[in-house]
Amino acid sequence: MARAAKPVPADKPGRSIWLQGLLCGALASALPATALLTAILLAPTVLIAVMVDRTSARTTARTMLMMGLMVAAHGINQLWHGPNTIVAGLDIAANLRLTGSAWGLQGFGWLLTEVAPLLVELVLDAKARTRLAILQRRRAALDHEWTLPGGGDDQTLAG
Amino acid sequence: MIAGQYTVDLTQPIAGAGGGLEAFAVANRAGARSGLMAVLSRPLALPRGTALNALASAQVDHLLTPVAHGLEVGPGGVPGWFVVCPLPPGPAIWPTGAMTVRPWTETELLMYLLRPAAIALAQLHASHLTHRAIRPDNIFRAAPGETVTLGNAWSAPPASLQSAVFEPPYSAVCLPHGRGDGDIADDVYALGVTLLCLATGQLPMADLDAEAIVARKLERGSFAALVGNSRLPPTIADLLTGMLAEDPEHRPSPAMLADPVAARARRVAARPPRRAQRSMDVGGTGVWTARTLAHAIGRAPEQGARMLRLGAIDTWLRRHLGDSGLAVRLEEFTRQRSVDGDNTDSVADMVLAARAVALLDPLAPLWWRGVALWPDGLGSVLVEAGQPGKQNQAVLDAIHELVDLEITSVWGKLRAERCDVAGLRADAALQRQLMRQRGWGGGLAALRYALNPMLPCASPLLAGQAVVRKTELLPALDAAAARPESRKLAPLDAEIAAFLVARQEPTLQSDLVKLTTVHDPSAAVVLQLRVLAGLQDRLHAPKLVHLAGWCAELALPAVLVWRSRTRREQVSEVLPQRAAAGNLTAMLRLIDDPILLAADARGAQAAVQAAETIDAELAALRAEAPARSAYAKRIGAELATALAVTGLTASFIMLALG
């Protein structure tokens, strides 16, 4: 008699993080200079991802990562075209201009993630207020012309 | 000025010339004495319009024939009707207030009184008119030995100024204003009594009141009651036998009286009324004959009807009067009464009493609830009983019921050989229809105006102005509108409405009906304006500036009916301009334009719908604020990511390209 198939358990978040850690560990063992240089250049992203960005989509960390990668890619490229040793990696990381650019772009990425929603909200609110004012003017004109019951709605968006 | 050529000189009264009414000297247009006088009607005792119109172009011998009539300001500044007629040739043949005069000789009576009076009556009869005011103090002559002239008889309702002595009992018993035009035979009767007065030099039955005179005439017969023990020349006695006959058909005609010898020779065998062996008490009156029984039932209809229902009268007719035929017919009425209603039905009792009177005495007038009148006197009675401040409610109620039940038609059918039944029926139906009309255009008021074409409109608005014809109404209202105190009232009231309907303005009927039921002030104003504007149009009335201004003041509620503020302001601005032009129709078009009103209503409805849509959108805008914030966060993040991806891609490309 055939046994009933057991339901496949969904991947737990803890397991995924463990696998990512294992993968990172393997990568660090295989390419220690690259891993070191990457860790130094993307340190702000790692800090934000681990300590601040608790959202499931990690939108802030994601943006910062991509911003950091824009400069980190050049450092890694330089490492790979050189001796590809830890010392070389540290030399490259010691280049303040490169590391500063990477960290600065990651900071800009964080700022962008924080400011962009506010800007969008401002634009949307302004649009809504304009529409509200138009509608209220139209309603007041109707009320004035026709003396409608319950006319004179002067409420704002705040209610 | 009357008829554009006669001026009444109120400072020159002429005593004793008006036949019981005030008379004044008349000057012609040039201001010279005209040989005419103007007799003033009493308030609400209207002149006889039909007779005046018929005599306008006629000349009747031995009669003060009217030459003109019209409304003019009388003593005290009150408008009154004046009838202009020639001055009497001399004093009245019986001075007013005198108890005796010198008895006239037979020759004087025949040549100077009977013959000229008969000629005048014959000419009136040829024009289908009656005089109805023949009595010694209304007959004049220049001097002894001259023929007499009959006085003015047109300034008051027919026979309303006659005392009971000079009227046949069936006329004397009626309300003074309800005696109607009667028949020329009634004038012959009055002439007969006048002949008797002058033959004896005394007024017969001078010591009796009107009721006693009527009772005695009915009891004994007019000739016996009036002549009594007086000694008369045989010719005069023979003439009076005919002239004072109870039945008008038994009296000689005026043409016959013009030849006294022939009139004397005419004898009509009139059977004296059958007298009972025992009298019967009906309503406190002892009755001996069918005629007096009818009179007693007419005066006391409740008791009469009860006795009829109980069979007491039936028994008396059979046992004591010996008229079983009459008893059988009365029995039929009593049976019909039991079908009409139960014993407490007062109206059924009244119908029974009225039918019994008509059967018992076909000569009797119409009796209803103790009130007697002839149908053609209904209009005058309505005016007299309904005069403001002195209303006779009992008479008005009786007439209301009488018209409502078409009793004149019932009464006419029972004495078909003595009246025009079809005419009475048609009149009764018309009167009932008019009275039953709902609203301001119906009721007794409308009937009063319909039956009295010369009755001025009694609206308090028109105080001081006499409006008789509908063409006079709007100018009078315009004049009233110029007085500030009038503007406290509405420009249209029940009296004006009744007046208009009675004066053949039936097209207003539907608006007048609505006026009594509408409670919305704006609708009432529009209806009033519609009626007045319709009149102005139809009657081609001139500009009515004051009335239009008054209507414009009242039209404020009608302006507020417009929903559109723009239209309201427009109407408010234009209305005074149109009022200043005195054009009511233009004003009506402005405030009561059906097409624009419908458009206004549609506009208001569309505005309400638009407002609802806007309100919904406003509410949605306010409600979506939290969602908008979440949306902004998501879009912001996406935007940041997109920028980062773009930058990263650019960086990789640059790296690849070296």
Image (spheres, grey):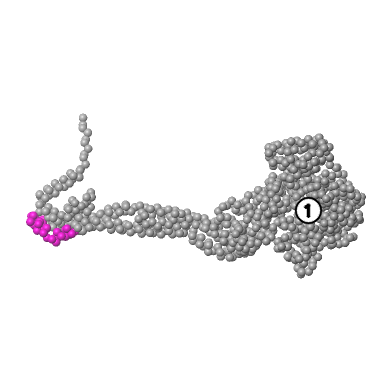
Q: Main secondary structure of the magenta part?
A: helix
Please report the residue visible at 84 percent of the width from the left and 50 percent of the height from the top.
Answer: B205
Residue B142 x/y as whole percent: 86, 62
Q: Residue furthest top?
A: A1
B460 relative to B133 in the view: left or right = left
Query: Where does the C terminus of chain A fall, quadrant-wise?
Result: bottom left
Residue at disc 1, secondary structure: loop
Q: Nearer the viewer, residue B578 or B181?
A: B181
Q: Residues within 10 Å of mark 1 (few under 14, many from 20)?
A: many
Please report the residue visible at 70 percent of the width from the left and 50 percent of the height from the top.
Answer: B392
Please report the residue visible at 76 percent of the width from the left and 41 percent of the height from the top.
Answer: B283
Image mark 1: chain: B
The residue that label 1 is drawn on is B159
Residue A158 x/y as whole percent: 35, 55
A19 relative to B287 in the view: left or right = left
* Residue A93 is one of the magenta-drawn residues: yes
Residue B657 visible somewhere in the drawing: no
Residue B24 visible somewhere in the drawing: yes
Q: Give the number of callouts.
A: 1
Residue B379 x/y as whole percent: 72, 52
Residue B524 x/y as whole percent: 57, 55
Task: Tell me which amino acid carries mark 1.
Answer: Ala
Query: Where does the N terminus of chain A fall, quadrant-wise?
Result: top left
What residue range appears in magenta? Answer: A78-105
B614 relative to B255 in the view: left or right = left
Q: Residue furthest front?
A: B207
Please report the residue visible at 78 percent of the width from the left and 69 percent of the height from the top.
Answer: B32
* Residue B24 is one of the magenta-drawn residues: no
